[in-house]
Amino acid sequence: MSELESPQRLWTRDFVLICVVNFVIFMAFQMLMPTLPVYVGKLGGRESMIGMITGIFTVAAVAVRPWLGLELDRRGRKGIFLTGLAVFVAVAASYQFAGAILWLVLLRVIHGIGWGGSTTAAGTIAADLIPASRRGEGMGYYGLFNNLAMALAPALGLFLINRFGFGELFTTSSLLALLALLLAAAMRVPPAPRGGDAKPALFETRALPPALIMFFITFTWGGVVSFLSLYALEKGIANIGIYFTIYALVLMVVRPVSGVIADRQGPAPVVVPGLILISLAMLVLAGAQNIWWFVLAAVLNGLGFGATQPILQALTINLAPPTRRGAANATFFSAFDLGIGAGSILLGVISQLVGFNRMYLLAALSGPAGLLVFFSQYRRKNMPVQQEL
């Protein structure tokens, strides 16, 4: 029996490769997240413009994900995966030549398309490679690699712009994306599942409830990734990279544990406390006075996001037929991106009106909203994550 056919083996050659590619591309991506707002400010943009720059990226990704999900199910995964990564390489190298806000907006749109293609394909490939009975655990480990990137990349990005400048930042990001492209080209990707009554589609309706919960979670992240650096500067903290490092380290500890718990006991014991912790993190940020408040918020947010995200993604995949796995991932990641985009844009406007403190206070309402969706859809608290239709 080959590696790809083994029903229970998780750590195959290609699962290791997709995890490493996931790490490298998230390094290239996450190092831009806390630094692009500073770049926009350098070009003369205000808070609402910073939110728009982040938001337009996610809008572009959301716009292409449904079509890409359909094509993943129709034509297979690898071609879309490699194309998305190639677009990422080209755009990351071009940021340093964007001397005006208009050009930056255009590059963000193209970047969002590449990001939508590469991440939708990568998540679908990972789901294909993980045994159904270990999907919560497997998605937890898969996500662990982008968490490791989150632990390193934001601080690296801030170091690069402070020590060398934005040119070195964008060059490093493009080289990392190129490495991800080369590694992805070496992968053996399983063919898209065939047969069954469910035909490929643009959206997977069974994925909508967990995707909506994910939207509320990433809505808060839009406020964190777009404005935390500026908020910290208001509090006299020049480099808030420690927040992202602690956040990601906590995620790395939580993800494998939460995946095993959910595979055995269902999603409720993981998702419910996770949503509560995310709201608590926003409340701590709203009252932040010094660096230790930010550290506490990072721990709470890491615990909450680390518990919920891989379980909701596993639930999304397993509630969909295998022939619509690409559509299910596209639906999930569309909500993921839309949450970040909506959070960046709406919270950016709110921050200009009432300040960052009250902005994070309002962001805390996302947790209760997610709980309402969860309990309205998943009353069976022991519903197995590994269920596959």
Image (cartoon, rainbow, N blue to C red):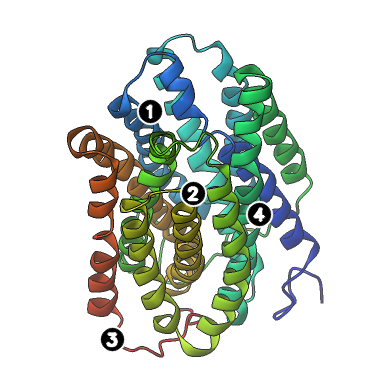
C-alpha separation, residue under disc 1 versus residue under disc 4: 25 Å
Q: From the viewer's perspective, is residue 156 above or below residue 364?
A: above
Query: In front of the other: label 3 or label 1?
Result: 1
**Mark 4 or 3: the one toward you:** 4
Identify the residue shown where x is 51% and y is 50%.
120
Mark 2–mark 4 distance (CA, rounded to whole Å):
22 Å
Residue type at mark 3: give it: Arg
Q: CA distance from mark 3 to mark 2?
A: 40 Å
Which callout, 4 or 3, points at the residue further toward the start of the chain?
A: 4
Crowd around label 2: few <14 · some 14–19 · many ≥20 (10 Å): some
Q: To which residue does mark 3 refer?
A: 379
Residue 116 or 158: which is nearer the viewer? 158
Compared across the picture, whether 281 is left or right of 72 comes to left
Residue on which the image places disc 4: 148
Q: How packed is label 3: few (under 14 Cα within 10 Å), some, or many (20 or more)?
A: few
Q: Nearer the viewer, mark 3 or mark 2?
A: 2
Secondary element at tag 1: helix
Reading the chain from its start, which is encountered first: label 3 or label 1? 1
Instruction: Answer left or right for 268 relative to 145.
Output: left
Q: Residue 28's quadrant in the figure?
A: top right
The quadrant of the rendering that contains the C terminus is bottom left
* Residue beneath disc 1: 53
Point out the tag, 2 or 4, that comes first from the N-terminus.
Answer: 4
Residue, x 44% and y 42% (percent of image)?
Answer: 225
Q: Is residue 322 left or right of residue 216?
A: right
Rendered residue at 44%/50% (across/down): 70
Instruction: In the rendered structure, find residue 291 and report the number of the disc placed on it.
Output: 2
